[in-house]
Amino acid sequence: MKKIAAIYLMTLFLMSGAIYAQHSIIPVPRSYELTEGELVIDNGLEIILMTENESLKEQVTLFASQMKNSGIEFSVGQSEAGKTLKIGLNDTVLDTLGTEGYQLVVEDTGMLLTANTVAGTFNGLQTIKQLLPVKRETSKEGDLLPITIKTCVIEDAPRFGWRGLMLDVSRHFFTVDEVKAYLDQMAEFKFNVFHWHLTDDQGWRIEIKTFPKLTEVGAWRVERHGRFGSERAAPKKSEKTTYGGFYTQEEVKDIIAYAAARNITIVPEIDVPGHSMALLAAYPQYSTRKEFKHVNPGSKFVDWYGNGKFKMLVENTLNPADPAVYAFLDMIFEEIANLFPGEYIHMGGDECYHGFWEEDAKVKDFMAKNNINNGDELQSYFVKRVEKIISSKGKKMIGWDEILEGGLAEGAAVMSWRGMKGGIEAAGMGHEVVMTPTTFAYLDYTQGDYSVENKIYADLSLEKSYSFDPVPELVLDPDLILGGQGNLWTEDIPSLSFAFYMTYPRALALSESLWSNKSNKDWDNFLERTSAHLDRFDAKNISAARTLYEPEVHVYKEGSKLMCELKNYFSDIDMYYTIDNTYPVSFGQKYEGPFQIPAGNLKLRVQSFRNGEPIERLLIINRKDLESRVK
Ligand code: ACM
């Protein structure tokens, strides 16, 4: 019996192994079957389009241009003389592929890619890219070497239709080219929603033609450096606002088209009624106090009390009792709806402080007249009016989970960020939900050791991101969970390279959680594939983090002894350390198990090595820091 079980397990292992063996595709496809044979590509493949379709033509032109620097030639033609990449759309829809799936057959004569839609062929082309090197290797003499791929059959389709990443362009302004670079990488991993956080206290980033001051004033702030919210000085009265930027409507259209060519829909966010300081710097009349204010440069304006409780020291909320506010928002959303072709508009709704409302005589009067009993209900009143505005433009409204408080607007979709509770509640009431819980999906959270990383709010490991399942058991109707997304808030992310560093590889973990079948996910195998992708990021000159190789340092007390335990994800990585203030660590101790940190003003130095070579940076942690880690 035992033997039979062992054979059965072995067979299962081999079968599931077949999904992963010989490839590093992320997100892992629904099915991948190796076949007997090899495709040898000497120069490139000739692309043959089997279906006349303008979008498909544009898609392969883009693909060929993206492959230009790889040393692999993709020409579009008809000759079929050499090896080919044939691409076609199914005459008869194959239900298993849905609207974004594809089939890819790799044979010794070439590749055949088919799908029901151009979204499907686009996704298939991303898989093909991952089967090929970023750059063809050359011989010692400098000749390009042929590429050999194991032949295979792939059938693939996503688990969720909403696979998003959010980029906050308010706290730091990213240029058009930087946004495009961000979209390029998203598309490679089959993300299909770009949530563009366009407005916040630190800057209004989109041209609204009816209200030019939104960008003339709201897009600019005084220049400050240092940690957001703690180290930056408040603006001085007549200081010049030199930092910032915004996207003109022409630029927005360009980015929308760029995203669409990459199977990405943009969800624009206009964050109201809170997070509106930049708007109010331009148009203070839409607050209760109507006072002059600066666009916030990251200087402190909130007292945080923990547990999500806070007090705003500067009014950054719109006045929900003022009819002019709704007329103003109507015109803004009119322009937004006309610009963005997608189904959803995000209205924010998060972290809205009620204090200024509750102190204002006119607001109190308004509440009494309208039977509104408290701040939550007033916020809900506001959200319901905004929902009516957005739906009147033919769009669906989505907002952060605070829009549940005081009663959810009819037809609103909820983006659940404070855990999944809000999402579960909204789905329970029949509303659509996108899951973006901080605990799995906040890409601004710290991903490596605090001694070398910025300590931001909380931490989030790659492993935790990989364990994300957007459909918790408590959801009775999983169809209401549209999917999920990772959020990159940029309070402390002042450059594109650092944005990439924080996004990848955790976004790879999210892409697999959102695209792949649960049964195909495998952490150890994901680590192997991620390692291969880190090399690809290097080849693409993109700054993905390598913290997955870094030792995890755990400190605890054993009686009066201060003890240290080191962990890492890989069995072939050795960790070497010293605790006597000496270098080099490679000549120190090889980690074999928990050790004591002796008394004294000592530093722990620790580093990961593979095959005798350092594989990630050296950590240096002083004793005080070590002691502070004891739980
Ligand atoms: C949020 O993180 N304030 C949605």
Image: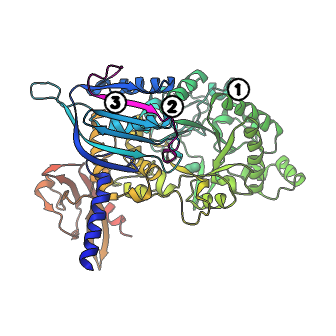
Q: Secondary structure at mark 2?
A: helix
- The amino acid type found where label 2 is placed reads Ala
- What is the C-alpha distance between the residues marked 3 and 2? 24 Å
Residue 376 screen position, x and y as percent: 74, 56
- Disc number at residue 211? 1
Please state the extent of the stretch shown in magenta in the rendering: 75-98
- Are the residues at dot 1 and dot 2 in contact (C-beta closer than 8 Å)? no
Q: Nearer the viewer, mark 1 or mark 2?
A: 2
Residue 562 in sight here: yes
> Disc 3 residue type?
Leu
Q: CA distance from mark 1 to mark 2?
A: 26 Å
Q: Does residue 617 lie above or below 254 as drawn?
A: below
Disc 2 designates what residue?
A: 259
**Residue 378 bears which disc, if any?**
none
Q: Quadrant of residue 271?
A: top right
Callout 1 amino acid: Phe
Picture residue at 40% right of the left edge, 46% below the top? 155
Label 3 vs label 1, nearer the camera:
3
Q: Residue at x 37, y 42 (%)?
A: 501
- Does residue 8 sit above or below 220 in this rendering? below
Mark 3 lies on residue: 85
**Disc with the residue nearer the chain's start (3 vs 1):** 3
Q: Earlier in the sequence, mark 1 or mark 2?
A: 1
